[in-house]
Image (cartoon, rainbow, N blue to C red):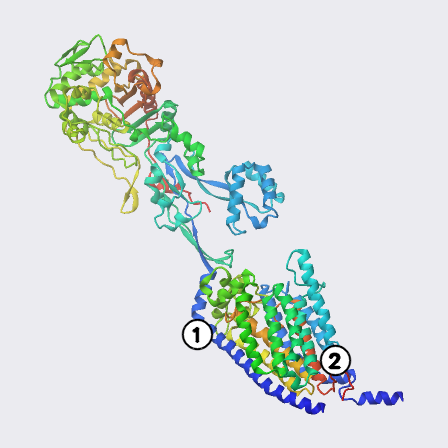
Amino acid sequence: MTDARFLAARLRRGDMTLPEKLWQISWSLVLWLCAIASIGFFMLYSAANANMDPWATRQLIRFGMGLTLMLSIAVIDIRLIMRYAYFLYAVVFALLIFVEVRGVVGGGAQRWIDLGVINLQPSELMKVALLLALARYFHSLSLEDTGRPTFLILPLVLVAVPTAFILRQPDLGTALMVIMGACVLFFMAGVRLWKFISLLVAALAAIPMLWRFLESYQKDRILTFINPERDPLGAGYHILQSKIALGSGGFFGKGFLQGTQSHLNFLPEQQTDFIFTMLAEELGLVGGAGLIGLYVIVLAYGFTIAIRCHHQFGRLVAIGVTTTFFLYVFINVAMVMGLIPVVGVPLPLISYGGTALLTIMICMGLLMSVHVHRDAQIGLRGGYDEG
Amino acid sequence: MIINRDNDRARVFNRRAAVLGGGQALMISALVGRMYFLQVVEADRYRMLAEENRINLRLLPPPRGRILDRFGEPLAVNRQNFRVLIVSEQTRDLQATLDALAEVIGLSEYERERVVKEVSRRRSFVPVTVRENLDWEEMVRIQVNAPDLPGVIVNEGLTRFYPQTETAAHVLGYVSSVDEEDLTGDPLLQLPGFRIGKQGMEREFDLVLRGSGGNSQVEVNALGRVIRELERKEAEAGTDLSLTLDERLQRFTAERLGAKSAASVVIDVHTGEVLVMASTPSFDPNVFNRGLTQREWNALSGDPRAPMTNKTISGQYSPGSTYKMVVALAALEHGAIGIDQTVFCRGYTDLGSRRFHCWEGLGHGNMDMVQSIAQSCDVYFYEVARRVGVDRIADMANRLGLGHSSGLGLAGERDGLIPTEAWKRATLGKSWQKGETFNTAIGQGYVLTTPIQLAVMAARLSTGLAVEPVITRQIMLDGAVVQRPPKAFASLAIDPTHLEVARRGMFEVLNGPRGTAHASKLKSKDTKMSGKTGTTQVRRITMAQRDAGLPKGDEIPWNERTHALFVAFAPDDNPRYALSVVVEHGGGGAAVAAPIARDIMTEVLRLDPSRKPRINEDQVAETAPSAPG
């Protein structure tokens, strides 16, 4: 009897032993990720003027920990993740409120919780938690129901409330990423296009009202983006210097460790948000385009995994994390090249910083978990049973 | 059923994934396209901008040329200057560091305020000067206390220093910080803390003394902090300027004049070289380099004895009786009076209803020319002037160097005034009165001269040559500084016998038994000095006052007392030195100016600078280590 029940459970597709799961992990993707991270270490080494300290070593340790975390997530049963999706969302939301309240009490805009090794930024984790929550919601919704506006109220609330908190911090970049990630999920879940269009119109109409809520430095950044000459020594200075660095790199770059702009501090934050600029200055178009090529490979993995997945939850999670990854890359690179306003978005696996790395590794872990459990049968609420 | 339902969703998902993937691919292509545009199409432009960013040209100030006296004695040099600076980013707390520094060297409230203000205006790594010109002891104290003074640095630069302080201040002038109107486009002038000549020689020869700036190409980071030096061109030190002054005589004279408001010039009559140009009271040019406080400036500019004015060239005084040689020579040259012809002095002479007094109220009796100069008889010269006329006197005055610039080329020199009939008509619109000729005869009225002119007059009287004074041993020629070529002076074309009469009179002033300055003759048995006293009224004495009895000495307010003058040359038989002394409101020429002149001339003859070898140009170059660092 016990045997039979055990056997029955074993027969359900997707139930695998740990070695089986490890076998299923896409190790080639892990290699590509390591390749990108290695470039990151070299860049951090260069950013510190040929020093392992203060960034490269610490980032190496963090990446090691992140890799472990990623692989651990990869072998977690996807149904378990699905079942706890709302719970995770609630926990992260509570953290978000916690930093908000403490920020008010402490009198400063502190967005993180100090965990010793890394500073945990709840708004970053919210990207992942929201993704999971939405994926679970849409998983349980038929295509017809997805078409009904009443069924869209709950997911919109799931998006809107944390976004409002993130905006209040104020962290425009993260808020926009959360919204865009959510939009992609809505779109992929099958929400009608005209609804997006009407939402877009509504958003445009809301801009003048939202404008009043922006901090003056945020307004500055947007105005400067529209007209960079407006303030060449103020907010526009960083974009200009970044473009100078990039452009002066030329086709083959100035050589590793040879970037004048970055090493003479003309670049702001060359170890975090502007690290791509430094890379492109030192390694040129060849290096920059090469790195983007690596990112494209990772994205291709993401799309392939999403399409090959046999359950809606996995598909949505995979496309969600892939899109998040894409948004990181695109926003960061477009920002340093002066295509969009300056927003604080790091370059995945390259920029120095714990929280972003953590988010990326969780995302990649989820992607791999989707891949490992692509054939799992999942009920409407993440159970085994329902039909 | 699930399968079916999921199939629908999968179909929609796949379709939309293609759209999404396509969209993302497009956006990434845009990124690569942008990169291509920046790094290939626009690469050259940005490469240039990056270089401009990186390289900063810094000016290196040249050491200023020194100013030396005729023997190479330094009058203006560059001194190591210890400056204490504060770098705010290296202080943990600016106020605390300033407190600590105040305990070591003492800081005024004003200094602290200025430092705090300047720190707030500059980037935090830019050193701000707290104080300049620290002495050695203060510097050492700061060094010893360095651990308690984070962010405090002491550095050395060069600053102008006048070792003789007040002695030759008027000739040297001073350097001071650059004003808006001084900017000529020379980038050196924009350097913070750069000094330019504002007065005297420092100003006249500023371009020569300044030298030319070097530069250093440095790599800087975004904040302007210097990372390393790429290229360096050293500054070219300014050229040393050599004056004709004798520092020891200059100092002696200045000290002899003391606190009086006075001026004195000594000239070598053979070369025209000015050995002494002293004006008292003086000022310390070092103070101007440091920068004056409002109070110091008020004290200097408000002093009635005008310490800032170089009285030797800017002070205009009626020559008084020192003008009598001019009148005498004009009369002799035009035959208005014979050498031995006498005039009777009964103490006054009348012109119409006006009475002109001789200084000797009792009268001198019969006076010839020599005696009238020796005893300074006014009545004799009223008569002589009446005969020769004011225009001829003016002509002789001009020939003797009065009434026009001496040609030294110093800024602020005044021309003086030698009145003629035409001058009066042109400027006052009135015709010349006979009484005015009488006033002119005794060097009063409209006549104005400067001490340098009086010294030149004495030199010309002693040699009969058109002596022209010079004060530098170098001249500017086509923008370069060259050694002044020796110059032979033209003859004044005055009959030597007539000159001899004038000189004879001057000899008697000091050496004759009745000479007005008999008491001030040289003590030497072998060497004699010739000279002439002058005492000039600075206010009109009315008839009523004269009748009431003139106030004496101390009863007269200082600024209403007479000026005391003296001109002289020596030795009388072979003149080498000529001098003039003017003591403003000093009293009588014989009583006050003559003893000073005697003392100065004694010292001049003792040191006899003209006979000593002067340093030549090679030695100047050798002794010019003006470029430390």
- What crowding class fits label 1: few (fewer than 14 Cα within 10 Å), some (14-19), or many (20 or more)? some
- For the residues marked 2 and 1, what is the alpha-carbon distance in whole angstroms? 48 Å
- The vertical placement of B165 against B158, above or below, is above
Q: Position of residue A369 (x, y in %)?
A: 71, 81
Q: In the picture, residue A291 is in which quadrant? A: bottom right
For the residue labelled by badge 1, is the local secondary structure a helix, a strand or a loop?
A: helix
Residue A255 in sight from this viewpoint: no
Q: Residue sitting at 39 percent across and 49 percent down?
A: B188
Q: On the rendered structure, is B180 left or right of B99?
A: left
Q: Nearer the viewer, residue B223 or B157?
A: B223
Residue A23, x across and y down, in percent: 73, 85
Residue B616, numbered label: none
- Quadrant for the N terminus of chain A in the image: bottom right
- Residue B373, given in percent of the width and then of the height, sits at 20, 16
Left or right, residue A28 beside residue B279: right
Q: Give me the chain letter of mark 2.
A: A
Q: Which residue is mark 2?
A: A75
Residue A21 or A173: which is nearer the viewer? A173
A67 or B216: nearer the viewer: A67
Mark 1: amino acid: Val
Left or right of B263 in this view: B368: left
What residue is pinned by disc 1? B41
Look at the numbered discs 2 and 1 and tell me whether their residues touch, using CB distance below 8 Å: no
Q: Is residue A384 visible?
A: yes
Chain label for disc 1: B
